[in-house]
Amino acid sequence: MVRALNFSAGPAALPISVLEKAQKEFINFQGTGMSIMEMSHRGKHYEAVHAEAKSRLKKLMDVPDTHDILFLQGGASLQFSMVPLNFLKKQETAGYILTGSWSEKALKEAEKIGQTKVIASSKANQYRSIPSRSEWEGEDGVSYVHITSNNTIYGTQWHEFPDTDAPLVADMSSDILSRPVDISKFGLIYGGAQKNLGPSGVTVVIADKQWLSGSTNSLSKFLDYNTHASTDSLYNTPPTFAIYMLGLVLEWAESQGGTAGLKKKNSEKASLLYDSIAGSEGFYRGHAEKGSESHMNITFTLPDKELEKDFLLKAAEKGFIGLNGHRSIGGCRASIYNAVPLEACEKLADFMNAYRKNHPARSFTFQ
């Protein structure tokens, strides 16, 4: 079988070695005569899988003892509600920094629960950049500051995380584990697994234990972080297969040199594609401003919609999958998460350069 050149935004590519190991163990896990999907989450075999996944993540991301790791369900979208349900108390205000559609959605959910304010936004420039620290207004007194570390739709990313007086909360769904991060800077990090950590179905939350202990949630025991922290994420049946796959991906990540090694590879992949854009003499135009470019999602447009359509059609014929931009803005997008190999990015860069040469310079008007 020829593997697709998969640049999908998520669910995204998984390492072939991980898929092969899961395939080998699928029917008979560790000689038990059962699949991991058939086992009790209270049994010793799954408990070992659960504990190992948590231990590997703690080591890979250098999670300090001050923070707990939770495996939850509902995707990152449920966290849009869980964060304010637990940490936005009456008479308090939460601060949100808007850098794209997902941060907008997080804000809308928080608005249903309590008082919020936008302390910075790049919406006015079509989310082409990350707001600088000097652009923030009204941060004083907020209960927490919420950011989205990488923006899949617009192709921007926080390359440095700010120091804040209030706890910093980050939706890291699309760049978690892609680079070293100082976990101690954050009150809480959350991310759906289906970009860099594994298949869809499990959401990773890394939270400051002291901040968690002061949270309140009178609406739902299940939506209370402390419920899951006190039961090692086993309050109800967890997504066992997704956590098993998460563990295999983390094992693979160790073999890649951990987060430092992954960052190096991701930077190389991103540079290949950004160089193709920069060297195209305006034929390709990146959406993100310099300094805010994502190393996970490279977004760009061509001179007109018809040419864009043809580019995507020709790319599909060459085996490239998932290069369409998000349906809300169109254009093109190459998602180069951890498991996307360098060779796939080299082939895409070659294709982009060849396509450009086959369409000689002429007068283009960007739409």
Image (cartoon, helix red, strand yellow):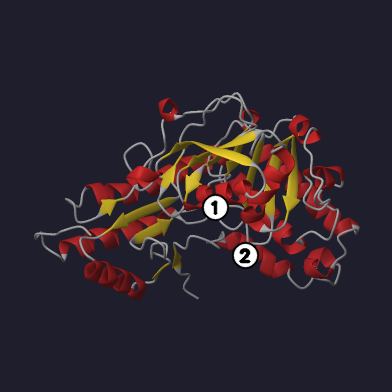
179 left or right of 204 in image: left
Q: Residue at x 42, y 42 (%)?
A: 267
Q: Quote the CA–CA distance across marks 1 and 2.
A: 33 Å
Residue 147 at x, y percent in the picture: 54, 40
If the image is split into quadrants, where does the C terminus sit? bottom left
Q: What amino acid is at disc 2?
A: Leu
The tag earlier along the polypeptide, 1 or 2, is 2
Residue 114 at x, y percent in the picture: 66, 43
Task: State the residue position of label 1.
Answer: 105
Determine the secondary structure under disc 1.
Answer: helix
* Image quadrant assignment for residue 64: top right
Q: Residue at x 41, y 35 (%)?
A: 131
Up-down: is 101 above or below 161? below
* Image quadrant assignment for residue 92: top right
Q: Nearer the viewer, mark 1 or mark 2?
A: 1
Q: What amino acid is at disc 1?
A: Lys
Q: Is residue 128 visible?
A: no
Front-most of 197 and 227? 227
Q: Residue furthest front?
A: 91
Q: Residue at x 41, y 38 (%)?
A: 130
Front-most of 180 and 216? 216
Task: State the residue position of label 2.
Answer: 19
